[in-house]
Image (cartoon, rainbow, N blue to C red):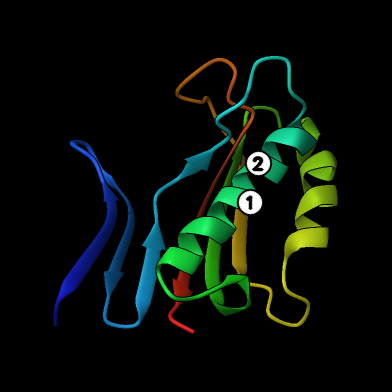
Amino acid sequence: MSIERIEVGPRMSQVVIHGDTVYLAGIVAERRGGTSVADQTTQVLQRIDELLAKAGTDKSNLLKANIWLRDIADFDEMNSVWDKWVSPGNTPARACVESRMAAPDVLVEVQVVAVKG
């Protein structure tokens, strides 16, 4: 079975497709300075929509989501955006944890796995 990679970089690919399974890298907001968790979550989910479309699928086909928050106290604020975005009746298995982030201005990171639609 072949492997397809989208937006390949020297360290990682943003999307890897194996069979009908689509794996996204952890996605963070591009515009971060002074932004809120809600704003960063909105940016991240928009980017996930774009990457899923490039892979021939969408959020209604999510299988799993991992979410990392700089501060778990932001859980409700992040969920206020997530709950409006996620496809009703098609919610993925999900984990959300507090974590030290790769950069000090990253407040949220999301990684998803989906099937091709």
Q: Is residue 78 left or right of residue 31?
A: right
Q: Which mark is residue 113?
A: none
Please name the residue shown 56% across and 49% down the image: 47
Q: Is residue 14 above or below residue 30?
A: below
Image quarter of residue 49: bottom right
Front-most of 110 and 16? Answer: 16
Residue at mark 2: 43
Please name the residue shown 84% across and 44% down the image: 76
Please name the residue shown 68% across and 80% down the image: 90
Q: Position of residue 89 (x, y in %)?
A: 75, 82
The answer to whether residue 96 shows anywhere in this view is no
Check disc 2: other Cα within 10 Å, few if <14, some if 14-19, many if 20+: some
Q: Is residue 24 left or right of residue 79?
A: left
Q: Amino acid at mark 1?
A: Gln
Q: Secondary structure at mark 1?
A: helix
Q: CA distance from mark 2 to mark 1?
A: 5 Å
The answer to whether residue 115 shows anywhere in this view is yes
Q: Amino acid at mark 2?
A: Gln
Front-most of 22 and 56? Answer: 56
Q: Position of residue 48 (x, y in %)?
A: 55, 55
Q: Position of residue 29 (x, y in %)?
A: 58, 34
Please name the residue shown 44% across and 75% down the image: 56
Image quarter of residue 86: bottom right
Task: Name the image quarter holding the N terminus.
Answer: bottom left
Q: Secondary structure at mark 2?
A: helix
Residue at mark 1: 46
Check disc 1: other Cα within 10 Å, few if <14, some if 14-19, many if 20+: some
**CB-based contact (under 8 Å), mark 2 and mark 1:** yes
